[in-house]
Structures are given as C-alpha cells and as structure tokens.
Image: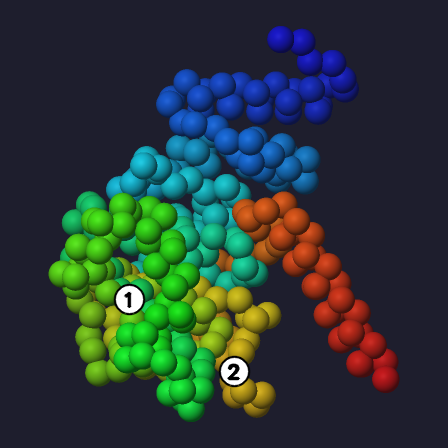
Amino acid sequence: MLIHGEQEPSEKAEELINELRFISSEGYLLKPEDIRYAIKSIAEGHDTSIKDLFLNNIPVSSKKRFIIPKTDTQRQYIEAIRNYDIVIGIGPAGTGKTYLAMAMAINALLKKQASRIVLARPAVEAGERLGFLPGDMHDKINPYLRPLYDALFDMIEAEKAGKFIERGIIEIAPLAFMRGRTLNDSFIILDEAQNTTSEQMKMYLTRLGFNSKTVITGDITQIDLPIGKASGLVEADKILSDISGIKVVYFSERDVVRHKLVQEIIRAYEKYEKRNAEDSKSN
C-alpha cells in the first residue's frame, strides 16, 4: 500500500486504514457510511479513535449482532448511560439519541441488569383532537408511540418483542400513564421530552425507583407545546445541571447519522433561524 501526500495527512490516512483493517479482522462488518463517518471525523480535526468507537459496541438480540456509536458524542452518550442513573440527551433529529438508548435498554435486559423496559412518550394532542381519533385508547395513542416500536423491532425479532410486550417485560405507554407509579428494577426511556410540561417532567423524574435507570431524550428546537407553555426538558436542563448523579449530553448536527442530506437540512434551518433572530433584534 502506497500513500502519497504531505506527511501529516498521510500519517492520518495510514492510521485510519490500519484501524479499519483491525476492526475488520475482529469480525465487524464495515458499512460504507461507517467509513464515511470515520473520514469526516478526521477531516474535521476531531481526535477520535475509530477503533474505540467500534469496540465500544452494544450487543443486542437481533440479526445485527451489536449497535455501535458512529461519532464521539455518541460514544460519550453510551458511556454516560453506563455510568449514570439519569442521562439527558439533547440534540437534533437523527443523532441516535433514542436509538442508542433503546440499544442500551435491551442490553441491560439481556444482562439481567433490569427486569423490564418502560418506553414513554408524551402525546401532545392528548385532549380534544385525540378523542376524535377512531378506535379504543390503544388505537388512539399508537401513532404517538410508533417511533419507539420501530426502534425496538429494529433490534429484536418481532415475535420475541411481541412476547416481551405481552408479558409486560417491555412496556410502551404515553407519559400520562406514568403518574402514581414507582418503577423499580427498570430501564426507562422518555422520548420527545421537549413536549413535556414542567409538571409532567417533575412527575416523570420522581417515578424512578430502586435499581432503575432512565434516559430522557429530546430536541429543544422542535417543541410542539402551545405558545407560552414552558418545556419541561428546557427547564430540567437548567434545574438539574448541578446534580452530580445526572449527566446531560448535547448532540449537534455533526452527530446526525441519517441520510447525508439530513445534516445539510439541519444546518440550513439553523442558519435560517439564526438569521431571523438577528433580524428581529435589529428591528
């Protein structure tokens, strides 16, 4: 193998190729996007070991033998979930906040570190409009919980996941169903937390029981609450920041792991919103 170019970038290229070879020799299946993320990370000057990302994998029960972090922030997020009982992940869509939390929850279940998984999501229209939807309560709330089912079925075979749900080992429910409960020996995920009210967030945080862990995820740029209603996630980020047992991990558009155009879309919207905010101030 010959690498031509200036010394520093050539050395980085050699190091990357050697790491990719090592990863492949360990039996990990490298995908084109994995290599693209690796090159992008180095090009942006991030001091990230691709080998460390791959070896920091999460075994889950599916045809995909493991889930791996794609960026250094995702790696920090996984480590935070391992080391803290309450982790808050804040960032744009597509950064893997919920997906990685789900992988960690399934892994904890498989390792018997938790006896059940509880997945919760606020139904922001759980008032009049929800009442007009057809079907029983399950039919009404199911559309709000669909993204959690999608992540679950991507990691566990549908038949096995169905049995877990039937037996109550995995529970997927709207946030309102958490009131009055104490969740022991559980791994709990609150998704779309930017759409919780202050009261709902406080209620949720106080459900945590013994030997339990919770991950709270949300995108504070996508708040769907009525105008004038404070987001429980935004408040929690401010109120809980000084508590040593709670870890907040912030994702950015650099951590988006969906289609490559998603990053460009997020970046374009951020520029647009920033420009509008500056124009409003000047006027």
Q: Give the CA distance from mark 1 to mark 2.
A: 22 Å
Q: Is residue 257 left or right of residue 279?
A: left
Q: Which class describes the residues within 10 Å of circle 2: few (<14), some (14-19), or many (20+)?
A: some
Q: Secondary structure at mark 1?
A: strand
Query: Which residue lies under the disc numbered 2?
Result: 225
Q: How many marks?
A: 2
Residue 163, x across and y down, in percent: 17, 55
For mark 2, give the secondary structure: loop
The C terminus: image quadrant: bottom right
Q: Residues within 10 Å of mark 1 (few under 14, many from 20)?
A: many
- Give the residue number, with chain letter if any, for mark 1: 172
At x 37%, y 61%, the residue is 148
Decide if residue 114 is in sight here. Answer: no
User: The N terminus is located in which quarter?
Assistant: top right
Image-based side of 224 in relation to 139, left or right:
right
Viewer-side label of 1, 2: 1
Q: Residue at x 27, y 77 (%)?
A: 178
Q: Amino acid at mark 1?
A: Ile
CB contact under 8 Å: marks 1 and 2: no
Q: Quadrant of residue 213?
A: bottom left
Question: In this orientation, which residue lies closer to the viewer: 150 or 255?
Answer: 150
Please name the residue shown 37% across and 67% down the image.
Answer: 145
Image coordinates of residue 103 in percent, x first then y, are 34, 49
What residue is at 73 percent from the left and 19 percent from the top?
7
Q: Is residue 265 among the parts visible in the rendering?
A: yes
Name above or below for residue 73 compared with residue 175: above
Please state the horizontal and vertical placement of residue 80, each as a whole percent of the image: 39, 53
Residue nearest the viewer, comparing 14 with 123: 123
Q: Of callouts 1 and 2, which one flags the residue occurring earlier in the amino acid sequence?
A: 1
- At label 2, which amino acid type do we have? Leu
Name the disc covering residue 52, or none.
Answer: none
Q: Is residue 41 left or right of residue 89?
A: right
